[in-house]
């Protein structure tokens, strides 16, 4: 029964207008600055400092990834946070951690 296509999803053609929207969105995303990994200057700042987008520092220690915007640049300039130098080997571990966190959040069996 290889000719039975009742379970296949129908192919959808993208309209010209939608394609222009997708192209514009891709162009806008290409101009977005890369995020930076920052660490707080002190434990006191770790408790109170967070980015306006809601991402703060974990209480246990470590760094946080913030967008490289005016807020972040001001915090770096006044010494509240320092930029953590990126290393090639560390990026893979961070990606795995982020995937794991995302997976835990999406897991319907976990009670909130």
Image (spheres, rainbow, N blue to C red):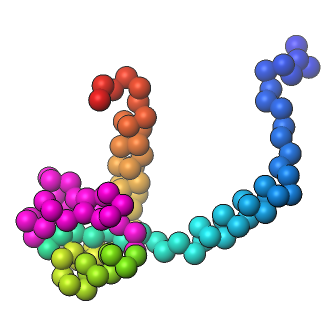
Residue visible at 72% across and 59% down?
22
Residue visible at 70% across and 67% down?
24
Query: In the image shown, does 26 or 84 lie closer to the viewer?
Result: 26
Task: Work out which residue is located at the far bottom of the displayed protein and give it.
Answer: 77
Query: Which quadrant is home to the C terminus?
Result: top left
| Image position of 94 with respect to 101: above or below | below
Query: In the image shown, does 71 or 13 lie closer to the viewer?
Result: 71
Position of 28 with respect to 106 (left or right) is: right
| Image position of 29 with respect to 108: above or below | below
Dominant secondary structure (helix, strand or loop) of the stretch shown in magenta? loop
Q: Is residue 18 visible?
A: yes
The answer to which image quadrant residue 10 occupies is top right
The x, y position of residue 67, in whole percent, is: 40, 69
- Check if residue 66 falls in the magenta segment: yes
> Which segment did they paint magenta?
42-68
Residue visible at 84% across and 19% down?
6
Query: In the image shown, does 93 or 102 lie closer to the viewer?
Result: 102
- Check if residue 109 falls in the magenta segment: no
Position of 98 with respect to 58 (left or right) is: right
Position of 71 with respect to 30 (left or right) is: left
**How many numbered callouts?**
0
The answer to which image quadrant residue 83 occupies is bottom left
The answer to which image quadrant residue 75 occupies is bottom left
Query: In the image shown, does 28 or 85 lie closer to the viewer?
Result: 28
Position of 84 with respect to 32 (left or right) is: left
The x, y position of residue 30, in whole percent, is: 60, 71
Query: Which quadrant is home to the N terminus?
Result: top right
| Image position of 45 with respect to 85: above or below | above
Q: Is residue 90 visible?
A: no
């Amino acid at each position: 029964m290889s000719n039975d296509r009742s379970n296949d999803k129908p192919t959808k053609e993208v309209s010209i207008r939608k394609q222009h929207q997708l192209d514009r969105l891709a162009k806008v995303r290409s101009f977005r600055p890369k995020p930076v990994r920052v660490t707080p200057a002190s434990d006191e700042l770790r408790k109170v400092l967070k980015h306006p987008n809601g991402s703060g520092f974990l209480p246990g220690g470590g760094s946080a990834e913030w967008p490289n915007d005016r807020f972040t640049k001001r915090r770096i300039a006044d010494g509240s946070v320092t930029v953590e130098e990126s290393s090639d080997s560390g990026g893979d571990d961070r990606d795995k951690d982020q995937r794991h966190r995302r997976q835990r959040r999406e897991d319907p069996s976990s009670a909130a």
